Image: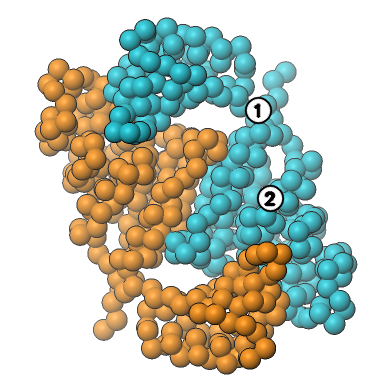
Chain colours: A orange, B cyan
Amino acid sequence: MPQEEVTAALLVIGDEILSGRTKDKNVGFVADHCNQIGIRLKEVRIVADDESAIIFALNELRRAYTYVFTTGGIGPTHDDITADSVARAFGVPIDVDQRAVALLRERYAETDLTPVRLRMARIPEGAELIENSVSKAPGFKIGNVIVMAGVPAIMETMLLAVTPRLKTGPRLLSVSIRVNAPEGQIAAPLAGCQRAFPDVAMGSYPFFENGRSGTNLVLSSTEEGRLRLAKADLIARLGPKLTVSE
Amino acid sequence: MPQEEVTAALLVIGDEILSGRTKDKNVGFVADHCNQIGIRLKEVRIVADDESAIIFALNELRRAYTYVFTTGGIGPTHDDITADSVARAFGVPIDVDQRAVALLRERYAETDLTPVRLRMARIPEGAELIENSVSKAPGFKIGNVIVMAGVPAIMETMLLAVTPRLKTGPRLLSVSIRVNAPEGQIAAPLAGCQRAFPDVAMGSYPFFENGRSGTNLVLSSTEEGRLRLAKADLIARLGPKLTVSE
């Protein structure tokens, strides 16, 4: 029986990305990681630190996909409203969680556990914690929603920590073919190959290098055998006049 | 009378971003540009080359914001389905547009204007064209939706070309303060300043550098005078013990 597809969305929370001040680095890492473990990242949204925007996006996404990853907004300052917004989206209470406080104690002296720092221990009721090996303040998983920090190094350690708890499906395998010709010259053979292999996803990505046009063709499938056949078929259709590198 | 706020969303269309194969470069450019011209980028979505995903996102976003920018999916290959999806979202016909064909003639000889290349001239009925000074094949604007290429150099030239046709609002001005202390130490003075200046947006962005924690504090407002007052207030609240650089 073929494995079931497992899907995900990523919700990036942060005014600083939308204003352009900070350039996002988390989308690429989450996309690569999902691809490697057999989760299909189907959608990304970036919203502001705004409760109603977070709740609207979260509720749409958690109903549409197997998992929703969120990044950002779980620090100690007043603009960190992700945990409270997630609790509200799920309709559950939120308070300082003693398991999270115990983790903060590994980093902070008792006198440094100020009310401000304890904000980082606010966890919605019913959530499991996600370990943060960088700075201790944990992420959490509630239902199918995985809430992580926005700082890339911390997000990455949390994503790796939660991965063993996630369902995964078949990995999408890909092959690339680089053609030294613009898209207009390869569109017809590519479309022909797509008709012959409707089960293999085919994408075409133009590039410009040293003033010349080229195209990367990417074939993707969960079936290695189909991928090999489709690639051979495409190379034959492109013909000997096009310079192809694999 | 204060100027009206003008908002926008960006819809990035492309399997290659979601699979991690291509790292997006357009979000940062569009965010910076919107910020500079007085348009508030409120949301970004990244969806696959999938008609129903594009239409669903486009219809939500064009109803919620003044403008929607899209990038990707307007080339000549079979996976370029953005123009057709936009036409369908608006419920208008789409066909090869003679104005767009005239632009392609500036680049291609008549014999090279194959049916494949003419796909790049498919424009929904009622749309205005957007000039592409890099490779001629135009973008377009229909209603409040601005459809641009995915290749960064082409997207950028299209965005600059369409800018004079867009409404803009007051620019959001920002000042940053860099503090050599973790968020936990600045959260209380920052929250105090936020209460004193509820009209100034305040964000806190932790960073780690050479093993030490620091925080960038960013204040934003359309009113330069309020920004200056809020910044002075915040520096006073942070107090002389924290090292601050502006």
Residue B229 placement, left or right of B68: left
Give how far across and how far down residue B65 sits, in percent: 61, 42
Q: Against A22, is B47 above or below? A: below
Pointer 2 chain: B
Q: Disc 2 marks which amino acid? A: Glu
Quadrant for residue A151, please give it: top left
Mark 2 vs mark 1: give the one in front: 2
- The residue that label 1 is drawn on is B171
Tally the numbered discs. Answer: 2
Q: Residue at x 45, y 37 (%)?
A: A14
Pointer 1 chain: B
Which disc is residue A135 wearing? none
Residue B186 placement, left or right of A101: right
Query: Label 1: few (<14), some or many (≥20) within 10 Å?
Result: many
Residue A107 placement, left or right of A2: left
Give how far across and how far down residue B132 sits, in percent: 77, 57
Image quadrant occupied by the N terminus of chain B: top right
> Residue B7: in sight, yes or no?
no
Which disc is residue B156 wearing? 2
Give how far across and how far down residue B163 sits, in percent: 75, 43
Which of B160/A74 is in front? B160
Quadrant for residue B123, please give it: bottom right
In 3D space, how far apart are the residues under numbered discs 2 and 1 (Cα atoms)?
20 Å
Q: Residue at x 62, y 59 (%)?
A: B150
Q: Against B219, is A210 above or below? A: below
Q: Disc 1 marks which amino acid? A: Arg
Where disc 1 sits, the SS reads loop
